[in-house]
Image: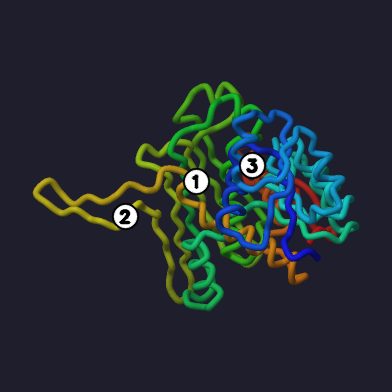
């Protein structure tokens, strides 16, 4: 293995730029060799070059076919994630794939079969696991400080709804937004979901409803170990990005609040005020975006297991599908109704 890990990034949009910046500024021992995007503009090309990319191109095959590139970041549109993952794995590249791997469960399974056959590292971009707040909750649970988890409450509210055109191709609120919370619930409880009940409505933007989706939802998850999780999600919290968790257990509880720009609290005759939460995920989770890559590259260098694998990408979409069906049919949906997950996917 070369002294530096050479990386190729497929997709130079917002998330591709996030990864490029944190590699360039925060992660030593890794170099961006090539960035590919079919919609590459001169402005983006200049940005990627300034971040150390040795080459920018519209042809992703230059990354797949380059023997010097050890790891590929797939940051392109959702519909390309699974085919590009398979191509990269078959070329012997380690892969970091943004979520979701695919919206089609069978295509995810096909991809995981290729990953297994190729023997490469395959990480899915559930970055919130690496956030300092959520990691602290996980550490407290794993250390037994609250005993066995009985109830998990997750608040997940965006500051503003996405464009309707995005909603039409994203899979909807359960696939592109609350999917992160499904992964977080599994991560914190240390158990697998067996049943999902979702209640959802349109309370923010009627155009989202016309596009066939919801903008407000509450999801209840039942786990194999008996724990119950409740997730409340909204596309619009006027006060900012609301990301909170409380885990209640047999010996106590642990809770986290929102990150703010400062901890200043002003107390005067008008009242007691503090900062609003950081505005959105780029402000809140930049540290997590860096840490997830640090652990990915450590796994490549040391031959260790990656922290978030293909099964995590699969089961999160299975839960999302169960939630979608539950909301549509107004009933609890068992995971076993959606697909067989006992086929060696772990």
Instruction: State which quarter of the image contains the C terminus.
Output: bottom right
Mark 3 burial class by Cα count in 10 Å: few <14, some 14-19, many 20+: some
Mark 2 burial class by Cα count in 10 Å: few <14, some 14-19, many 20+: few
Q: What x and y, as percent, mark residue 183?
A: 62, 55
> Which secondary structure lies at badge 1?
helix
Q: Nearer the viewer, residue 278 or 53?
A: 53
Q: Quadrant of residue 9?
A: top right
212 w.r.t. 193: above or below: above
Total marks placed: 3
Labels 3 and 1 touching (C-beta < 8 A): no
Disc 1: which residue? 281
> Label 2 to label 3, Cα distance in Å?
34 Å
> Label 3 to label 1, Cα distance in Å?
25 Å
Instruction: State which quarter of the image contains the N terminus.
Output: bottom right
Disc 3: which residue? 49
Residue 315 circle label: none
Disc 2: which residue? 262
Q: What x and y, as percent, mark residue 335?
A: 71, 51
Which label sits in the foreground, 3 or 1?
3
Which label sits in the foreground, 2 or 3?
3
Q: At 54% across and 40% down in the image, what residue appears?
A: 199
Q: Is residue 197 visible?
A: no
> Which secondary structure lies at badge 3?
helix
Q: At 69% across and 62% down in the image, what residue appears?
A: 297
Q: What x and y, as percent, mark residue 32?
A: 69, 50
């Amino acid at each position: 293995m070369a002294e530096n890990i050479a990386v190729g990034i497929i997709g130079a949009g917002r998330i591709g730029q996030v990864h490029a910046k944190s590699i360039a500024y925060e992660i030593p021992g890794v170099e961006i060799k090539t960035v590919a995007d079919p919609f590459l503009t001169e402005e983006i090309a200049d940005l990627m070059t300034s971040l150390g990319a040795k080459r920018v191109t519209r042809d992703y095959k230059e990354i797949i076919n380059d023997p010097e590139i050890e790891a590929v970041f797939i940051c392109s549109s959702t519909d390309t994630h699974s085919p590009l993952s398979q191509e990269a794995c078959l070329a012997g590249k380690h892969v970091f794939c943004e979520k979701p791997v695919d919206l089609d469960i069978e295509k995810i399974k096909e991809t995981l079969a290729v990953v297994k056959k190729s023997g490469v590292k395959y990480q899915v971009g559930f970055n919130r696991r690496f956030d300092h707040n959520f990691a602290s909750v996980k550490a407290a649970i794993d250390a037994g400080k609250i005993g066995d988890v009985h109830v998990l409450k997750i608040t997940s509210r965006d500051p503003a709804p996405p464009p309707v055109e995005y909603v039409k191709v994203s899979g909807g609120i359960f696939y592109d937004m609350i999917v992160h919370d499904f992964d977080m619930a599994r991560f914190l409880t240390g158990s697998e979901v067996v049943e999902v009940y979702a209640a959802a409505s349109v309370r923010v933007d009627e155009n989202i409803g016309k596009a066939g989706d919801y903008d407000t939802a509450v999801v209840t998850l039942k786990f194999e170990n008996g724990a119950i999780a409740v997730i409340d999600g909204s596309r619009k919290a006027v006060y900012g990005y609301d990301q909170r968790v409380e885990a209640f257990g047999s010996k106590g509880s642990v809770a986290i609040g929102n990150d703010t720009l400062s901890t200043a609290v002003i107390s005067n005759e008008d009242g007691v005020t503090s900062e609003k939460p950081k505005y959105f995920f780029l402000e809140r989770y930049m540290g997590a975006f860096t840490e997830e890559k640090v652990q990915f590259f450590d796994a490549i260098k040391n031959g260790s297991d990656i922290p978030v694998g293909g099964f995590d990408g699969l089961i999160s979409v299975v839960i999302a599908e169960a939630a979608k069906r539950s909301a549509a049919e107004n009933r609890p949906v068992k995971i076993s109704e959606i697909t067989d997950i006992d086929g060696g996917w772990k």
